[in-house]
Image (tube, helix red, strand yellow):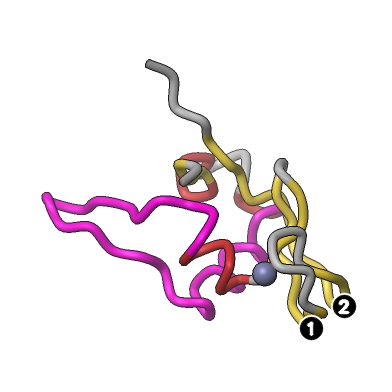
Amino acid sequence: MTTTTINITGYFEGGCCGHCGRELRYCVQTDAGTFGAACFSKTITKPRTYRGKSYRLSTDAVISLAKTARRDMARYPEQFTFEAA
Ligand SMILES: [Zn+2]
């Protein structure tokens, strides 16, 4: 079985969500398209698991992560990788 992953690659302001088409102030750029933080965390990715518990990142956390993607991608690639829902 293969797992499809989505990687956050960057952040920019002003655009449309590739999932719901909503106009966005904060855009999360991924290798699967541009999404709003809420759609990214709640709809297009699976929750992460930590010590057996699953959790989803808050929209603020997704945005902060997107903002650091370009800088930290090389050092912490696993932070930016999510399982596609
Ligand atoms: Zn959306």
Q: Which image quarter: residue 39?
A: bottom right
Compute the Cα span from label 2 to label 1: 5 Å
Q: How many marks?
A: 2
User: SS at mark 2?
Assistant: strand
In the rendered image, residue 42, in percent from the top left (x then y), is placed at 46, 66
Q: Going 13% across and 51% down the picture, which residue do you hit?
A: 51
Q: Which mark is residue 13?
A: none
Q: Position of residue 44 (x, y in %)?
A: 54, 54
**From the viewer's perspective, is 85 left or right of 21?**
left
Which segment is the magenta one? 43-70
Question: Does the magenta portion include 58?
Answer: yes
Question: Does the Cβ of the disc 1 residue fall within 8 Å of ligand 1?
Answer: no
Image position of 13 (left or right of 11): right
Q: Which residue is mark 2?
A: 14
Please state the horizontal and vertical placement of residue 24, each as a whole percent of the image.
78, 79
Residue shown at 74% from the left, 78% from the top: 26
In the picture as drawn, the residue positioned furthest to the top comes out as 1
Quick check: marks 2 and 1 in contact, CB under 8 Å? yes
Residue 49 in the image: state x and y as whole percent: 25, 51
